[in-house]
Amino acid sequence: MHSNRVVVITGAAGGVGAALTHRFLSNGDTVIATDVNATALEELGDGAALDAKLIAAAADISTEADCARLTDVAREQAGRVDVLVNCAGWLPAIPFEQLAPEKWRRVIDINLTGSYLTSRAFLPLMKERGWGRIINFGSGSVFDGTPSHAHYVAAKAGVVGFSRSLAREVGDYGITVNVIAPGLTVTEPVRRNFPAAVLAAQRSSRALKRDEEPEDLVGPVFFLASPDAGFITGQTINVDGGKFMT
Ligand SMILES: NC(=O)c1ccc[n+]([C@@H]2O[C@H](COP(=O)([O-])OP(=O)(O)OC[C@H]3O[C@@H](n4cnc5c(N)ncnc54)[C@H](O)[C@@H]3O)[C@@H](O)[C@H]2O)c1
């Protein structure tokens, strides 16, 4: 099952999600691309033949109702789900003493609860076929506890624990669950919001001293989604140019 899969990608209109969407479409897979940003989602297609296999469905993955609706979309328009990539995320930098409870909850809802809700929504479809791949996005910030990100780091550490536990529960159904932990990746919002000095410091902290690009994350996700990765589960794979060697 190396092409013709049905792949759900959350946060598909974001920097990494868009790169992933194009890679799976180019491989001949069907992609159910979902994002809360409906306008950006509309711009995802490139007008080419590949768009025929692109199913765009706007949804807020932090709500049960929207996740249930996505399950209906998958059943009705694709008939199954083979791969779920939880790429949606939100990382507002807020110093802890200014962090209001509603911001804490929203960040946990999007970055952690969202992965739970989508896994819950699509697991039955994977179980039916006895094959599935769940790939969740963590973050390298878990390893150094980036300041002003306590809410985000807590959520992403939660993603690691959640993925390990779920991996043990669903192994008997032929489903694997893994985490990709990116380093600071130069997407448009990162380029806009992070000073050049921060990017320079990131580069020098790596064994491979260059910026991390969204495309750097595509190959590892693609591999975890493939039969070649069939005996890998419950793992966190750092894709950060060798910043952390844990
Ligand atoms: N870019 C980085 O430096 C970096 C570093 C470590 C981890 N990550 C993680 O990698 C993943 C991809 O990040 P990115 O750089 O592409 O970010 P991005 O901000 O470019 O994209 C994230 C996407 O998620 C969507 N989203 C936010 N809330 C949502 C919700 N409730 N429901 C559905 N969609 C929602 C946004 O609209 C956006 O399109 C995220 O999980 C992020 O936390 C990114």
Image (spheres, rainbow, N blue to C red):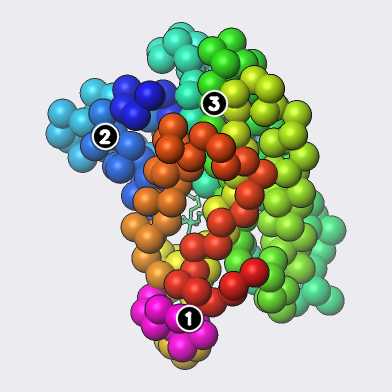
Of the numbered discs in the image, which one, if any, rests on residue 206? 1
- The residue nearer to you, when weighing 165 against 32, is 165
Q: Which residue range is magenta in the image?
A: 202-211
**Residue 238 x/y as whole percent:** 55, 62
At x 57% / y 16%, what residue is drawn?
130
The structure residue drawn at horizontal position 84% and vertical position 58%, both measured from the top left corner, is 101
Distance of mark 3 from mark 2, alpha carbons? 18 Å
Residue 172, how many percent across, how many down?
68, 22
Which SS does the magenta portion mostly show?
Answer: loop
- Could you tell whether 122 is left or right of 24 in the image? right
CA gap between label 1 and label 2 equals 31 Å
Circle 3 residues within 10 Å: few <14, some 14–19, many ≥20: many
Image quadrant in which the C terminus is located? bottom right
Label of residue 27 in the image: 2
Q: Is residue 150 magenta?
A: no
Please state which amino acid type lies under the numbered disc 3. Gly
Q: Identify the residue position indicated by label 3 in the image.
A: 132
Residue 70 located left or right of residue 53? right
Q: Is residue 30 visible from the viewing direction of this image?
A: no
Which quadrant of the structure image shows residue 166? top right
The residue shown at (33%, 37%) is: 24
**Is tag 1's residue or tag 2's residue first in the polypeptide sequence?**
2
